[in-house]
Amino acid sequence: SASELGKAKEASAAELVKVKAAGSAALAAKAVELSTLKESGAAELTKVKNASGVELASVKKTLTGELVKVKEESASELGKAKEASAAELVKVKAAGSAALSAKAAELASVKESSASELGKTKEASAAE
């Protein structure tokens, strides 16, 4: 009975060694797998970051181009508006000048007419 007990203990000890070895091997395999996953994940994250950076740069470039176009169009429209305003101002000035000249001529005519009337009145008074 003692001999069987000794054999059973030896068998149990041997089995325990096998189980420990198997557990250690499985643990080592999982550690390698985890390490590989970490590296793979880090590489994938780097790819995503790089792609996002490139895409962001492209979006920035597009938006900058659009902004430049809008600025150029706005400047062009402003230039056209200024030219139109200047042309309108020239027309208004010319019309004002013409009206002023007409009024000046009218005033001169009234002065001459008044002077002539005054002269006639003086002559008539002197004759009386």
Image (cartoon, rainbow, N blue to C red):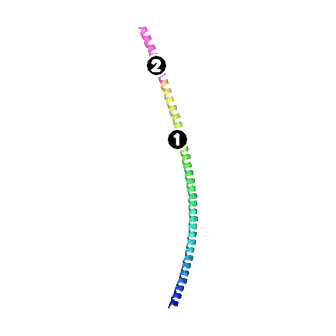
Residue projecting furthest to the front: 2
The kind of secondary structure element at disc 2 is helix
Residue range corresponding to the magenta coloring: 106-128
Give the camera-side residue of 83 and 126: 83
Residue that carries the numbered disc 1 in the rendered image: 81
**In which quadrant will I find the C terminus?**
top left
Give the camera-side residue of 25 and 86: 25
Comparing marks 1 and 2, which lies closer to the viewer?
1
> For the residues marked 1 and 2, what is the alpha-carbon distance in whole angstroms?
47 Å
In this image, 61 relative to 108: left or right? right
Give the image location of residue 42, x and y in percent: 57, 64
The amino acid on which the numbered mark 1 sits, given as a three-letter code, is: Ala
Can you say whether 42 is above or below 96 in the image? below
The kind of secondary structure element at disc 1 is helix
Can you say whether 27 is above or below 53 in the image? below
* Residue drawn where x is 56% and y is 51% of the image: 64
